[in-house]
């Protein structure tokens, strides 16, 4: 079977790895628009239960991921001048870039072909180029392919009411941290966790009405980050908030949470050699 994964994020890479290991005769190719060490975002958090699932699916990969994780058991919540800490939760954080590199190396070790710096504008042309029997649309939240075949998939997409921005900081955290701050227009929440020796993910979210009331929808990235640094200064201890999404401008840095139910694959039927989306 010839399998083409369009998008080399964690989902596309892990699917490719498992399919190749399931049957080494499969020809599996992952096509990614970025370079191997490019990534957007900071840390990725997984529960202990998820790590157990990874070990069951592919023990060598799980071991490499586990060795790179920063592990913690505590959750601390800051709200209205009080803090509450609980323990025994079992979570792990890893840098998204490190996770991608582990999965890239494992894919290459089992014989998956990785193609970088290739932006896919036409999935059908690429499917024909690789004579693909199965195309996996793993090209991110705003997938061109899933959008192209929306009438077939008929996805159920519900955009939630909050906006969030994904930032990082060198403030070290010893617990999964939830911090709530109230402004004259409403509430902001930070959820933050350390994922390597000196870096933490720091995600800030707020209802869209509050986001607009503060003018964040019209702010460029440096101004918005300065606003967030001031708002959450007491949790940062003088450390800066950092973005690695310099390609985004203005409100594009702030994403709405989507709830999506959608089939995300395209099967290449043998009907005149034409790729036909199937559910």
Image: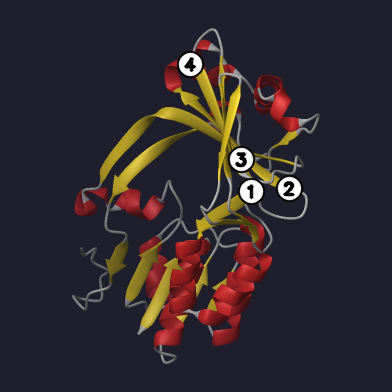
N-terminal-most mark, 4 or 1: 1
Identify the residue under disc 4.
210
Residue topped by disc 3: 192
The residue that appears at 48% across and 59% down in the rendered structure is 120
Q: Is residue 8 left or right of residue 36?
A: left
Residue at the (31%, 64%) spot, across then down:
265
Residue 7 appearing in the image? no
Whole-percent x and y of residue 183? Answer: 56, 12
Q: Residue at x 45, y 63 (%)?
A: 49
Measured from the top left, where is residue 227 in percent x and y? 67, 20
Name the quadrant containing residue 57: bottom left
Q: Residue furthest right?
A: 238
- Disc nearest the viewer among 4 and 2: 2
Helix, strand or loop at label 3? It is strand
Check contact, mark 4 vs mark 1: CB within 8 A. Answer: no
Lateral position of residue 41 relative to residue 170, left or right: left
Q: CA distance from mark 4 to mark 2?
A: 28 Å
3D distance between C-alphas at marks 3 and 1:
11 Å
Residue where numbered disc 2 is placed: 199
Cβ atoms under marks 2 and 1 closer than 8 Å: yes
Of tags 2 and 1, which is closer to the observer?
2
Q: What element does badge 4 sit on?
A: helix
Label 1 secondary element = loop
Q: Nearer the viewer, residue 210 or 80?
A: 80
Quarter occupied by residue 171: top right
Quarter of the image for the N terminus: give it.
bottom left
Residue position for label 1:
42
Quarter of the rendering occupied by the C terminus: bottom left
Q: Is residue 22 visible?
A: yes
Counting residues from the N terminus, which is met first, the one under dot 3 or under dot 1?
Answer: 1
Q: CA distance from mark 3 to mark 2?
A: 10 Å
């Amino acid at each position: 079977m010839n399998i083409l994964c369009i998008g080399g994020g964690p989902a596309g890479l892990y699917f490719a790895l498992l399919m190749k290991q399931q049957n080494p005769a499969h020809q599996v190719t992952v096509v990614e628009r970025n370079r191997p060490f490019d990534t957007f975002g900071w840390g990725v958090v997984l529960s202990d239960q998820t790590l157990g699932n990874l070990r069951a699916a592919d023990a060598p990969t799980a071991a490499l991921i586990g060795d790179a994780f920063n592990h913690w058991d505590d959750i601390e919540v800051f709200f209205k001048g009080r803090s509450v800490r609980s323990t025994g939760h079992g979570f792990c954080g890893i840098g998204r870039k490190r996770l991608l590199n582990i999965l890239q190396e494992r894919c290459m070790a089992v014989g998956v072909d990785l193609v970088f710096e290739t932006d896919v504008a036409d999935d059908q042309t690429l499917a024909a180029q690789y004579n693909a029997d199965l195309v996996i649309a793993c090209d991110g939240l705003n997938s061109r392919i899933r959008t192209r075949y929306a009438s077939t998939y008929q996805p159920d997409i519900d955009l939630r009411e909050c906006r969030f921005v994904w930032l990082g900081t060198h403030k070290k955290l010893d617990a999964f941290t939830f911090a709530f701050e109230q402004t004259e227009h409403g509430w902001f929440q930070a959820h933050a966790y350390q994922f390597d020796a000196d870096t933490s993910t720091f995600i800030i979210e707020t209802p869209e009405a509050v986001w607009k009331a503060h003018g964040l929808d019209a702010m460029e990235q440096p101004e918005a980050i300065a606003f967030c640094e001031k708002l959450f200064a007491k949790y940062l201890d003088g450390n800066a908030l950092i973005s690695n999404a310099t390609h985004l401008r203005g409100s594009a840095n702030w994403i709405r949470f989507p709830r999506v139910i959608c089939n995300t694959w395209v099967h290449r039927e043998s009907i005149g050699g034409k790729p036909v989306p199937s559910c």
